[in-house]
Every structure is written in structure tokens, then in C-alpha cells.
Image: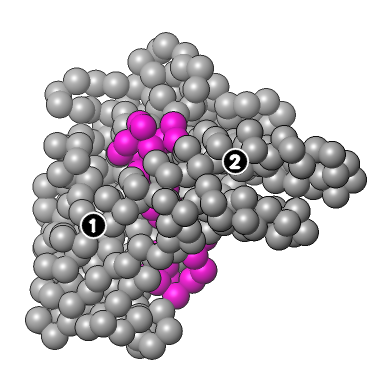
């Protein structure tokens, strides 16, 4: 799987852009705040319908414009596919696959599998649990249509239940209607817990070997799934803690409050690990993510590296570069001297300046 081209209209700081990518490695370089990350973001939106920054559609549309367009041409098992997204300020986005509109945005998942790696991901270990849940959910939604369905339904029911909890404060007689939502939240939540546990188990098998190699055999890394509630206890706890939920006007128990713990040689990295250990654990996680996606989709995902090389020391950078062989990789950076020294196979280099791209020669031309 690889992206052949990307076309943007009125997207962020791009009035118009049409760019072709190499099937292996493409570099986008230039000063900060020129629009390099915007290109990666548009690719990510094409795969997931959402910005990796959490931006709303109206924030993505170019200043003083009412709509934006993204067109992504994808080659998958030698077959070309086209994804079109029409972003509008005051309406839901329109999505079409190969020219045919889709009714639900979830139908887009799986057409293009991407892995986004940015300096912020190096902090996933020490940041709050919401970021780790987001990592789990985004990956599983790309890989598993059943998980996507259960996740979507769970969040719908969770919002309905939370709204009801707020109303009960003013209309106590509504408390009897909670049972309907309890049954559904347990049904979908249980499936989410099981899928997350299975995914983390698969991830651990790959993660361990990668981390041992990264640290020269000095450290072993393991992820522990920290469930907010055990699936077998879910229904009983919702009932037992009902008064607490009413008091706080929100659902206190469920997979929406889960977390993952990272342990190096049995010691929790978030609380007791050094910054170097935290970064290495995050890198191991991303590399394991690449491998598990390859195994599950029987194809290679597209890797988006957003200015991450400058954040890694030479050993970690070398390991990452060796690991991405055979995977389409699109890299943003402020300069490509490091890549020339590494003698990577790079056939396309673009300079990005104020929302415009300028193609440069093959890497061999710079040697």
C-alpha cells in the first residue's frame, strides 16, 4: 500500500496543492510554520476522517474560505483507489471512495492505513491516559470494523447516559430509565475491553523483541492494560455506583476511563523512568505498531514522520531508519543533511515554503 498523490484545495495554508509521492521515501523540508505538517495531516484525515491535532473541520479550512477539498490517490495491491473529502464549515464532511459517496465516515477506515509519528508521540508514556486511549482507539478503529462499530455505539450510549444523569438532578423520577442505557453501555463496553486486551497482548509479543534490540538487551518492556472496570463486574458496578454517577452527573466507570501502563524491567516508566527510557519506550511502541498493522492487514501501512528525527539520538534514529525498509515513508524535517549522511534511498525531495512546494532532484544529485 502506498499513496501516489495528494491534491488539496483551500486546506490550511494551501490555496492549491498537487503533490506526487515516491513509493518508498519522500522528504518534505523547510523552515517551521511553512505547511509541512499540514500535508501529513491531510493524509491522516484521508485515512481516519480526523485531524491528528484534534482540529475541527472549520479550523482546517483556509482562512476566509467556506470549504476545503482533499483528494488522495492510493495504490493497494496494484489497484488504484481515490478518496475525496469535502470539508465544510457549517455542515458535516462529505466523503467519497472511488467516486461513490459513503453514508458513514466509518466506511473509510481500512482503505488507507497510516501510522503518524511526531515529537508529541515521544511523550505518550508520560502524558495523561486520554492520549494512550486515543492511541488504542485510533489503531483499532483502522484495523477492526467490529471494534469501530462497538466504539461508536459505546460513545453514543455514554453521551446519552451522561445527559440523562444531568436531567435526573432536576427530574428524579427519570432514574428508572437508566437501566436501558446501562444494558447497552455494558454490551458495547464489554466488547471494547476484550478487543483492547487482545490487541495489547499481540502488541506485547512484538514490543518485547524490539525494545530488547533497541537497548542492547539491557531492558525488557511490557504494557499492562489497566482496566477501569472488569468486564464481568461492569453491570453490577454501574448499579452499585449509580448514586455516585448521579452526584457527579457523569459515568465514572467504563472503558472510557481505561489506561495502559508501561513497565521496564518491572518498573513503571511513567513515574520512575528517565526521559531517555520514556522516549525509547515510545519509539518501541511505534515500531511495534508498524509490525502489528503489517501482520493484521497483510500489507504495509504508510508511515508519516513529522520532524521526529531531530528528537532522536543517533542510535534510536539508526534503528528507526533500518526498521522502515519496504514501507512508504513521508518525512518532514527542517533540513535533509542527516538523511544524506545516512544514504537513505530517497527519490523525491520537496522544499515547502509558505504553502507552496518546490520539487528538487533525486538524493543522488546531492551526493
Q: Which residue is mark 2?
A: 182
Residue in the foreground of this view, choosing between 40 and 231 = 231
Q: Which residue is mark 1?
A: 201
Asked whether, in this view, residue 123 is left or right of residue 327, the answer is: right
Residue 138 on the magenta segment: yes
Q: Residue at x 28, y 57 (%)?
A: 200
Q: Are marks 1 and 2 in contact (CB under 8 Å)?
A: no
Residue 215 x %, y %: 16, 80
Residue 114 x %, y %: 32, 44
Check disc 1: other Cα within 10 Å, few if <14, some if 14-19, many if 20+.
some
**Label 1 vs label 2, nearer the camera:** 2
Measured Cα–Cα span from mark 1 to mark 2: 28 Å
Q: Residue at x 46, y 17 (%)?
A: 102
Q: Which residues are magenta?
A: 121-150
Q: Single out the residue that lies furthest toward the top.
A: 100
Q: Identify the element where label 1 is drawn.
A: helix
Q: Residue 137, which numbered label? A: none
Amino acid at each position: 500500500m502506498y499513496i501516489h498523490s495528494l491534491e488539496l484545495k483551500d486546506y490550511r495554508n494551501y490555496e492549491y496543492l498537487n503533490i506526487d509521492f515516491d513509493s518508498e521515501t519522500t522528504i518534505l523540508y523547510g523552515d517551521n510554520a511553512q505547511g509541512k505538517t499540514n500535508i501529513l495531516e491531510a493524509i491522516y484525515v484521508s485515512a481516519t476522517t480526523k485531524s491528528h491535532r484534534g482540529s475541527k473541520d472549520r479550523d482546517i479550512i483556509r482562512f476566509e474560505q467556506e470549504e476545503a477539498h482533499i483528494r488522495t490517490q492510493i495504490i493497494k495491491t496494484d489497484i488504484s483507489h481515490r478518496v475525496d473529502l469535502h470539508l465544510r464549515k457549517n455542515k458535516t464532511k462529505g466523503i467519497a471512495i472511488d467516486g461513490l459517496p459513503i453514508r458513514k465516515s466509518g466506511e473509510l477506515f481500512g482503505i488507507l492505513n497510516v501510522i503518524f509519528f511526531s515529537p508529541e508521540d515521544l511523550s505518550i508514556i508520560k502524558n495523561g491516559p486520554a492520549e494512550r486511549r486515543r492511541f488504542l482507539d485510533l489503531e483499532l478503529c483502522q484495523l477492526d470494523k467490529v471494534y469501530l462499530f462497538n466504539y461508536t455505539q459505546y460513545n453514543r450510549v455514554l453521551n446519552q447516559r451522561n445527559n440523562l444523569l444531568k436531567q435526573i438532578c432536576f427530574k428524579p423520577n427519570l432514574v428508572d430509565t437508566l437501566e436501558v442505557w446501562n444494558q447497552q453501555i455494558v454490551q458495547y463496553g464489554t466488547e471494547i475491553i476484550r478487543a483492547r486486551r487482545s490487541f495489547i497482548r499481540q502488541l506485547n509479543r512484538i514490543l518485547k523483541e524490539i525494545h530488547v534490540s533497541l537497548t542492547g538487551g539491557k531492558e525488557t518492556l511490557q504494557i499492562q492494560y489497566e482496566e477501569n472496570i472488569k468486564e464481568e463486574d461492569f453491570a453490577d458496578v454501574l448499579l452499585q455506583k449509580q448514586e455516585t454517577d448521579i452526584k457527579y452527573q457523569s459515568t465514572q466507570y467504563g472503558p472510557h476511563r481505561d489506561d495502559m501502563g508501561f513497565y521496564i524491567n518491572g518498573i513503571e516508566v511513567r513515574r520512575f523512568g528517565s526521559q531517555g527510557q520514556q522516549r525509547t519506550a515510545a519509539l518501541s511502541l511505534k515500531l511495534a505498531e508498524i509490525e502489528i498493522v503489517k501482520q493484521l492487514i497483510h500489507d504495509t501501512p504508510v508511515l508519516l514522520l513529522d520532524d521526529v528525527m531531530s528528537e532522536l539520538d543517533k542510535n534510536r534514529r539508526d534503528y528507526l531508519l533500518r526498521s522502515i525498509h519496504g514501507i512508504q515513508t513521508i518525512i518532514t524535517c527542517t533540513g535533509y543533511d542527516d538523511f544524506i549522511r545516512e544514504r537513505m534511498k530517497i527519490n523525491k525531495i520537496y522544499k515547502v515554503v509558505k504553502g507552496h512546494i518546490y520539487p528538487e532532484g533525486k538524493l543522488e544529485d546531492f551526493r
